Image (spheres, rainbow, N blue to C red):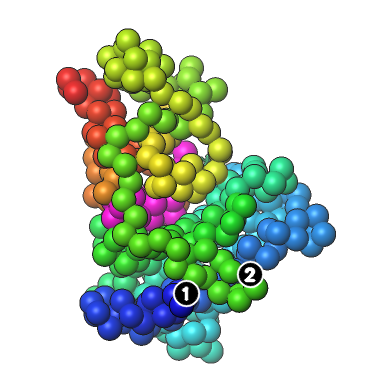
Amino acid sequence: MATSLSRYLVEQQRAKQNIPPELRLLLEVVARACKSISHAVNKGALGGVLGTATTENIQGEVQKKLDIIANEVLIEANEWGGHLAAMASEEMDSIYVVPNRYPQGEYLLLFDPLDGSSNIDVNVSIGTIFSVLRKPETSEKVSESDFLQPGHAQVAAGYCVYGPQTTLVLTVGDGVAMFTLDREQGSFVLTQENIRIPEDTREFAINMSNMRHWDKPVADYIAECLAGKTGPRGKDYNMRWVASMVADVHRMLIGGGIYLYPAESDKPEGKLRLLYEANPLTFVVEQAGGKASTGTTRILDVEARKLHQRVPLIIGSRLDVEQAEASIQGRAS
Ligand code: AHG
Ligand code: MN
Ligand code: MN
């Protein structure tokens, strides 16, 4: 019989005591929210969800209607269950504290409600990325500083890709499991456990149109990849750039690869957000045997100084990330 997400979580807790009931509720609620977002995505023009809203987020990005819808779905699904103290989102200026009318729980939820916004209107894979932290015990009243924890403090993380299939990928720090949405049953069904990322790759993902903004070490590393079999990397690479990190990382989780969004002269801190994108995807990728780095520091060790902090990111197959790091740091690899 197929294993539903609920059953998987219950059985994991029974076997390993690593998913207490509040965390299980949280993960089930996030999955339920992803299911609603998936339905909205699938309706497309018929549901009036395409196009741009009239607002900008705190990072100055024009919001799409679906950025706002997905954000609301996640808030509404998660605020009343008693499992959370507060939430933070790429699409909200500041944290959302669970209202007084509901009980407050011990966890904090962070999310990029809709990753790959530029792909919504053109029917290309997009996703939701989420991260779960424990509220520090020292803190009485929840505040923004409670969210400023390093990525290695995450208790769970994952993402949902809305593509040809709707796929939920999850880690609670004990490997990575994948679930596929069964639309007839209305539930996520376990389709792969103990996912391992191939250790090296012949595929890289970077936005090549930004090449003029790269530092020399990054440009040199990509030049080495482009040089192919007779170059220093000794293999022919293929390139993919979906422009939805969640889809690029999912592709790499299944088949190996390396994804880079480095610091660029016009984006000196990088583009991706540490707390909503880099940390959760790194937790998943590390749990599958891969690696992620700023070029010099392990992503999960980066100090979080502010909620919407950006970070340069290199993520993917272990050996390739190590080689990219070595090359960027000017070490032989
Ligand atoms: P978001 O849609 O949440 O703002 O994230 C988009 C991110 C990432 O998913 C993607 O890989 C990258 O930005 C695309 O950047 P370019 O537009 O520079 O290609
Ligand atoms: Mn994103
Ligand atoms: Mn987003």
The stretch drawn in magenta includes residue 31:
no
Check residue 183 in the rendering and tell me which mark sits there, or answer none: 2
Q: Amino acid at mark 2?
A: Arg
Q: Which secondary structure, mark 1?
A: loop
**Percent position (x, y) of residue 34?**
56, 66
Between 63 and 31, the one nearer to me in the picture: 31
- The boundaries of the magenta stretch are 271-288
Please count the marks in the image.
Answer: 2
The stretch drawn in magenta includes residue 278:
yes
Neighbourhood count class around disc 1 (C-alpha, 10 Å): few under 14, some 14–19, many 20 upward? few
Check residue 2 in the rendering and tell me which mark sits there, or answer none: 1
**Percent position (x, y) of residue 209?**
54, 22
Q: Which secondary structure, mark 2?
A: loop
Between 313 and 97, the one nearer to me in the picture: 313
Give the residue drawn at x 32%, y 12%.
Answer: 231
Neighbourhood count class around disc 2 (C-alpha, 10 Å): few under 14, some 14–19, many 20 upward? few
**Percent position (x, y) of residue 192?**
40, 61
**Closer to the camera: disc 1 or disc 2?**
1
Q: Quadrant of residue 202?
A: top left
In the rendered image, the residue lying farthest to the top is: 230
Sequence order check: which comes first, mark 1 or mark 2? Answer: 1
**Percent position (x, y) of residue 63?**
66, 50
In this rendering, the answer to whether 209 lies above or below 4 is above
Report if the beta carbon of the residue with label 1 is closer than 8 angstroms to ligand 1.
no
Magenta-colored segment: predominant secondary structure:
helix
Q: Is residue 128 found left or right of 217 in the rendered image?
A: right
Q: Is residue 270 found left or right of 149 in the rendered image?
A: right
